[in-house]
Amino acid sequence: MFTGLITGVGTVKSVTPLGAGRDARFVIATPDNDVWRHADKQLGASIACSGVCLTVVEAGDDWFAVEASAETLSKTMLERWQPGSRINLEGSLRLGDELGGHLVSGHVDGVAEIISATPENGSTRWVFLLPPDLAPFVAPKGSIAINGVSLTVNEVEGREFGINIIPHTAANTNFSSLQVGDVVNIEIDMLARYVARQLSFKNA
């Protein structure tokens, strides 16, 4: 489990196709900050990489390697990662850690496209286009994880929703390198997922 509070931005060092090119191995350089200089990157550890929970299969002092299956690549924007891509990093929660964002599982539900980014007072208003199957799960003032960042939804209109990013968040996540037309990983609120599941049985 994670909180959606990013602790650093890493950089993809290399991408190696596996399994006839259907799977992939990524080597990720960790940021040079206090959290990641002392981070526990032991084999088997879970790290949220732009919102995707991945397992460490190898690690060094300032890097770690993960592998992603074809299923993960098809449901996320990891297939677009290339050397130099900047990704948000968060280590998994430990018992007793403060929960400052919202509970994030690292199980990405799909991707959304950025359709606008407009300065608004001291922040930036970002608007995203959701795939049709995810749109019903996003509600105004609800929680959502975008590339692993815990955020509050401002408004929803059809398949579009908007959020505001303050300068601190932009400077400490990969929002600083995103552009209109890019796609991002989306994890809907866990509560919305289970409510929808219960309603599907009730309606059946």
Image (cartoon, rainbow, N blue to C red):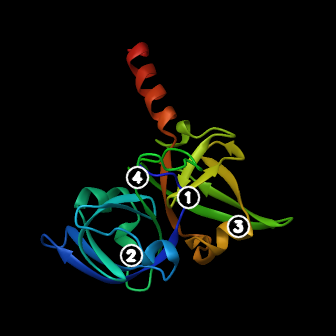
Callout 2 amino acid: Trp
Q: CA distance from mark 4 to mark 1?
A: 12 Å
**Closer mark to the observer between disc 3 and disc 1:** 1
In the drawing, what numbered circle is on residue 182? Answer: none
Callout 1 amino acid: Leu
**Closer mark to the observer between disc 3 and disc 4:** 4
Which type of secondary structure does the marked residue at label 4 adopt? loop
Residue 15 lies, in percent from the top left, at: 29, 80
Residue 155 lies, in percent from the top left, at: 72, 45
Which type of secondary structure does the marked residue at label 3 adopt? strand
Disc 4 target residue:
106
**Of 36 and 96, which appears nearest the observer?**
96
Which type of secondary structure does the marked residue at label 2 adopt? loop
Which type of secondary structure does the marked residue at label 1 adopt? loop
Q: Quadrant of residue 142?
A: top right
Callout 4 amino acid: Gly
Disc 1 target residue:
5
Q: In terms of sequence position, does the residue under pointer 3 or pointer 4 come before the other?
A: 4
Disc 2 target residue:
81
Disc 3 target residue:
117
Q: In terms of sequence position, does the residue under pointer 2 or pointer 4 come before the other?
A: 2
